[in-house]
Every structure is written in C-alpha cells, then in structure tokens.
Image: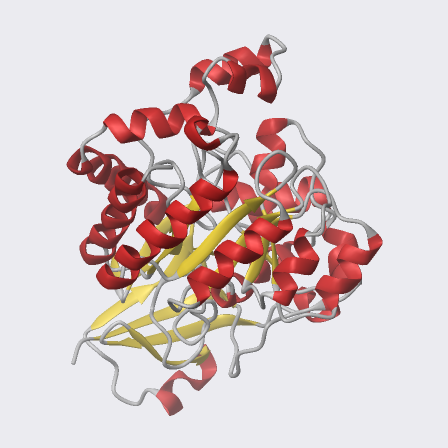
Amino acid sequence: MSSILVKHIKQLVNVREQNSLLRGTALANLPMIEDAFLLIEDGIIADYGPMYELELKVPQLPKHIIDAAGQFVLPTWCDSHTHLVFAKTREEEFIDKIKGMSYADIAAKGGGILNSARVLNETQEDDLLYSASQRLQELIKLGTGAIEIKSGYGLTVGGELKMLRVIKKLKAQFNIPIKATFLAAHTYPVLYKDDHQAYIDLIINEMLPVIAAENLADYIDCFCETGFFSPEEMETICNAGMSYGLKPKLHVNQLNSIGGIESAIKLNALSVDHLETMNDADVQALAASNTIGTLLPTAAFFLRMQYQPARTLIDNNCAIALASDYNPGSSPSGNMNFVIALSCIQMKMLPEEAINAATINAAYAMELEKELGSISIGKKANLIFTKPMPSLAYLPYSFGNNLVDKVMINGIFV
C-alpha cells in the first residue's frame, strides 16, 4: 500500500465528516484546519487533523512525506458544465462582437453554434479527441479534478454520436471523473428550422437508441430559450432521454424567463444552468426544489451580459454551484480559478461561498459527492496545493495570478 503524508499544511480547506448539499447561510461555512496534516493511502484520503494530533493518529510515519508549509490544500474544482469537445475556436466572432455585431447578426452570416456544428461535422474523430485531450490536460493543471462535457456541436446523427464517442474515449484516457451529457437540442439545424418536430423525432428515434446501446451519455440537456427550444419541446426530449436512464441537466433562463425553470423542476432535473434572467417566481420555485442552480459567470463576462443574481439565489435558500461553461463561442476558458474570482468580484459571493459552490455543491451537480468535493475520509485524493499566500481570500482577490502550485489526482501529482 502506498502512503503519503502531507504535513504542516497552512490551512486544509473544506474538511467535512458528512456530505450535504449546501444552501443559504450554510454555503458560507467552509470548515478548515490550520497547521494540518493529511494522510493519503492508495490515492484515497485516509486521515487528517491538526499537526498536534499527528503522533496519536499516525504513529508510524510513511516514507513519502510532503512538507506543505505556507500552502493551502483544497479539494479540486468540479466543473459541472462544459462544451470541451469542439473543432475550432471562434475568435473571428469575438472581433465581430467588438465591432458591434449582435449574436443574431453573427448567426445570420453562418456564425454561432451552427458555425461550430459545420466545422465539427467536417472534423475527424481522432482530431477532436486530440484537441479535447490537450484542453483537458491544461484544465487539470489549473485545478479541475472532475468535469462534465456536453455534445451539441454535431446537430446531426453522425456529429452528435462522434462527439459522445470522443467523450467516452476521454473517460478511458483520463483518471479524473468525466460525465457525458447529450445536447443535440442545442439549436435547430438549418434543415429543420421550420420543422421542429422532425428534428425532435431524429433525436428521439435515431440518436437516443444508439446512445443507450453504446452507453455514451450520463445526462440529457436542452437549450430552453426563446428562438431555440420551448419548455414543452424540452419536456418531450427529456422524457424520451429519461426512458433510457439519462437525467436532465438543462440550459434555462439565459436570456428570457419562459417557464424553463418550472418545466425543469417538473422533470426533476439534476441542475438548471445559466440563470442570468430570474424572476421572483423562478427563484421561489428553485428554492423549493431539489434542483441545483449552476451559475456560469464567465459566459456573462465574455458576452457582456448581466451576471446571475447569486446573492438573491443564496439569500432565498437555493442550492447553487459554479461552473466554467467552457466553449468556443461564449466562454473560451475553463479556468475555474477565474470563475471563483469573478463570482466574488461581480456576483458578490464570499470566497467561502464560491469555493463551496465549485467543490461540494458542484460535485452534487455531477452526482460525484461520494467521491469528490471535500476533504473527507474515503474520498479521492484529488487536491489543489496553492502557492504560499497570506489568506484564502487572496485566491479570488489576486485574480490575475495563477496561485495553483501543484495538482494531485488520485494521490499522484500531475
């Protein structure tokens, strides 16, 4: 059995004996141990405590000892909403937006999601796998220790299955938990823009049976928005997915409140993601449900949109998580450290709230709370070791610096 002792940790952050999805004032409670030790056995957290308990708890020290003096040790980020698999970046649209073009203008000239779909369908599976692997390696170095990845840039039977097969290969290639989400209902392809039912039939009759047969997805998603999929269309698609065992994780309330929250809760969705546009009824419905609201502040930042009303959601007892929305069109960064900083700077979340939302609550938003999200005995030793810093609040405060010194996955430094 391989054992590692980490000693003299300045602060061991998010130490929990029991799991619970955090809401309201509980989100600001981030348990820590100062001058701590952490014992790892075979990639699993075996014990921890203050240094003065070390001799009592670990009478025989292992050969491998790490001195973490001055460093904070946290559970890795769980990024529960990304579009990591894509064929091409879209910086030319970035320039168009700077020049004043609207999203609709860009879409009208073949940009947006349809642009990504066209290029993806022309790209070989191996090329997609290579580029996605490169991105994921970078994100792990920045502290991401679990990730959800969506399809949705195929919009054809072949394209969607190709994306999901790439995600399945990433699951086999990487030693972090990866969840796959089927998002053919991202937008209507040009061919079906006047015949929505025919595209929905394609999703239900031609895509879902293959996905189930090849075990290609964990969740099903739909972009419920004006001009995209209505709440009723979302319910039809999700009910079909649920018949194959795919739980809903849904894009709602990004631009408009059109009943998506109500429908998602009726579907018992694991999470509702975006939430830039929330009215009082939406907030109360979410607060009374078991559904997690996942906030994506880097998308609002990049699109110069209003930020999600994090304080209102927290103060009304909603369960919230944070994620990067990494994608080429509206959030071309998967850096969860910046997500944490932006949540504090622009959404007025406390550092403790942001860290909890990106660790334990985000683990719940991927059904990984038994494996990850906190420093707990029996969980994976997926850990962030920070560079020496004066306080935990310095992490979001010093938003322009990479304060991640090392990342450990399953007890091994990457």
Q: Residue at x 73, y 45 (%)?
A: 257
Task: Using residue 187 as the reference point, say whether residue 152 is left or right of it.
Answer: left
Q: Quadrant of residue 354?
A: bottom right
Residue 119 vs 139, above or below: the answer is above
Q: Residue at x 45, y 69 (%)?
A: 367
What x and y, as percent, mark residue 46?
34, 81
Left or right placement of residue 344 versus residue 118 in this view: right
Q: Nearer the viewer, residue 329 or 185?
A: 185
Residue at 52 percent of width and 20 percent of height:
107
Q: Quadrant of the N terminus?
A: bottom left
Q: Quadrant of residue 335?
A: top left
Q: Residue at x 53, y 41 (%)?
A: 338
272 or 133, which is in the foreground? 272
Residue 286 at least partly seen: yes
Picture layout, residue 39 above or below residue 206: below
Residue 283 screen position, x and y as percent: 77, 58
- Residue at the extreme right of the image, as rendered: 280
- Which of 76 and 312 lies nearest the eye of the viewer? 312
Vertical comparison of 399 with 110: above or below: below
Residue 83 in the image: x percent, y percent? 41, 42
Say how many tags the image has: 0
Residue 289, horizontal then vertical, whole percent = 68, 70
